[in-house]
Structures are given as C-alpha cells and as structure tokens.
Amino acid sequence: MLGTLAKEDHNVLYEAPVTAIEGIETDCPTVRYEYDGKECELTADIVAGCDGFHGAARQAIPSDVLKTYEMVYPFGWLGVLAEAPPSKEVALFSHHENGFALLSMRSPSISRLYLQCAPDEDLSKWSDEKIWDELDIRLGAPGWSLERGPILRKEVTPLRSFFSEPMQYGRLFLAGDAAHVVPPTGAKGLNSAVADVSVLSAALIDHFKKEDDSLLKRYSDVALERNRQVQRFSWANTAMYHNYPDRGAFEQRMFEAQLRYLVSDETPQILYAQNHTGLPIEYWPDI
Ligand SMILES: Cc1cc2nc3c(=O)[nH]c(=O)nc-3n(C[C@H](O)[C@H](O)[C@H](O)COP(=O)(O)OP(=O)(O)OC[C@H]3O[C@@H](n4cnc5c(N)ncnc54)[C@H](O)[C@@H]3O)c2cc1C
C-alpha cells in the first residue's frame, strides 16, 4: 500500500528505511520508504542524501554518471572502550614495528584505544590482558605504562578510503559518508559530514529564501574540493603510521623518515595541525 505524507505532517520519522529514490532528474523527486509495515512515498523539491555509506541515496545516481574511488587497506583496527582514566591528557599516536596504536579518550574515566590488526582479526584470540600488554608494548615508554581497567567493548574495524563524484545529481545532494569514507587515522569522518552539511544548508537557504541557486549549483564542486584534501590527509596519515604487509623496505624507511621529520620541526607540525583540526573556512572558494 502506498501512502503519501501530507505537507503539514513533515517530521522526523524513525525506523523508516528508504528503499529507493526516484525521479531525481525531475523537479519532483520521490523518496520511497517503509514505515509501520507500509510502503510509503514522499515527494520533495530537494533530496539530501545523508544516509551513510550503505544507504540508498548514492545508488540513485545513474551508474554511468557516478565515479567511485576506493582503497581498502590490508589491515584493520582492534578498538576497545575501557573503564580506565586516559593515561595522557592528549591523544597518543604510535608507530611501532608491531603496528600502529592509538590512545584517545572519551571522558575522565573512559579511554578509547586501538591496535593495528589484520582486517579479519579473530577477536577470540585477544584476551583483555593480551590487549593491554600489546598496547603497552606499542604505546609505552621507559618508566611509563598505561592505566589499565575493565574492557567494556572491543571490535575490529576494517579501514577504507572511498569517495564518489559527483556529490549532486539533479535534485539529489549527497553529504557525509553517503559520498565519502576516510580511514579513522585522521578522525575526519564526522567533521567532513558536518562540513558538507554546512555548505549544503547555506546553499538551500539561498535557494529557498533568496531564489539564488548559484551555490546549490556548485555544491558538488565546493564539497569535493574540500573532501579531496581530507582524503589526502587521511590516506597520507594512515600510510605514515601503519605497517603494510606488502610494503618494500625502501618505502617503509621513507615513511619513517617522514614521521621523524614531523616530530622534529615546527613547519610540518603547523601543516599537520591545520589538516588535523580542519582546513580554514577560507579554503571553501567564494563562500
Ligand atoms: C569505529 C568508528 C570510529 C570513528 N571515529 C571517528 C572520529 O573519531 N572522528 C570522526 O570525525 N569520525 C569518526 N568516525 C566516522 C564517523 O562516525 C562518520 O564519518 C559519520 O558518522 C558520518 O556521518 P553520516 O551522518 O554521514 O553517516 P552515518 O553516521 O552513517 O548516518 C547515516 C544514517 O542513515 C541511516 N540510514 C542508512 N541507510 C538508510 C536507509 N536506507 N533509509 C533510512 N536511513 C538510513 C543510518 O541508520 C544512520 O542513522 C568513526 C567511525 C567508526 C565506524
């Protein structure tokens, strides 16, 4: 059964999976979704596709238009959430011959820690004690070790770089993981989603309030320009910190040299900090 949401009923719907987005090349695209056991549809002026990497929005762009770029890394991250005060007041990134490790924090009493592992790592082989021991090996320094505590959650996350072009087609505008995914080494995924939405919302305000479509027409170009820089940083950062099973000895030494250069000189540190904390707003052309 098909239902239509009347204008006055527009609201946030939860548990309403979108099954298809149609007519994006027309003035009146249709979003089909399931809700309360029924098949429903919603017509709209504009569709913002913010439904993550596995959502329906990107699939709505014709395959002869959509170009995708992807790199799947030959490793993953074994992540743990631990009931332990963060061992440092700042995040620690470590490159070690056993692999990358990261100490980060959620609150004064909860730490988030990661170990580079195989993409299909078997978690049953990792007792809590083994995880803490390996974190100490990769992150520890003489006379300093991690604050340990009960591990509340552990999971393995594969690492991927992905982006698609264009980010708009007809009346459909992609934002966030629907259009691009970065490996977590740069902690840029959520920031990039918010950056997209801040451009798209400005463009939609211009469209609806001022009848000015100039930014909306350039949304894909503006968002992609920034996203390529985010992809570059996340990819380069991942390459610098991790061990690659298929990397030659020369390349490995070069990435280690890059890391040593970063920690030894203020100039690369300024560039690194700028990329990490976010490119300046001036980077967005003409906004
Ligand atoms: C383990 C892990 C750690 C991370 N750490 C960081 C970090 O430290 N910093 C950072 O910036 N980023 C981090 N990220 C990335 C960040 O979580 C994502 O980049 C961000 O959540 C993307 O937001 P989004 O809204 O585009 O997509 P999502 O957060 O994926 O949201 C998409 C939403 O759409 C819904 N949806 C999907 N399909 C449909 C459908 N067919 N119909 C209706 N709804 C649908 C989903 O249920 C979801 O609610 C991390 C990711 C992971 C997995």
Image (spheres, rainbow, N blue to C red):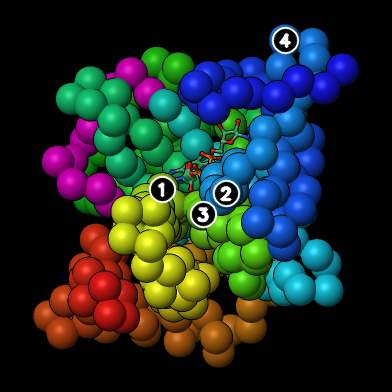
Q: Residues within 10 Å of mark 4 (few under 14, many from 20)?
A: few
> Mark 2 or mark 4, which has the lower sequence index?
4
> Mark 3 or mark 4, which has the lower sequence index?
4
Give the mark toward the camera: 4 or 1: 4
Disc 3 + disc 1, Cβ < 8 Å: no
Q: Does the residue labelled 2 lie within 8 Å of ligand 1?
A: no
State the mark number for residue 190. 1
Q: Does the residue labelled 3 lie within 8 Å of ligand 1?
A: yes
Q: Does the residue labelled 1 lie within 8 Å of ligand 1?
A: yes
- Asked whether residue 76 appears in the rendered view, the answer is no
Locate the C terminus and report the quarter of the image it occupies.
Answer: bottom left
What segment carries the magenta color?
82-93
State the mark number for residue 45. 2
**Residue 62: percent from left, percent from top:** 80, 65
- Judge whether 258 appears above or below 96 on screen: below
Q: Name the residue under label 3.
A: 175
> Mark 3 or mark 1, which has the lower sequence index?
3
Give the mark toward the camera: 3 or 1: 3
> Mark 4 or mark 1, which has the lower sequence index?
4
Q: Name the residue under label 4.
A: 36
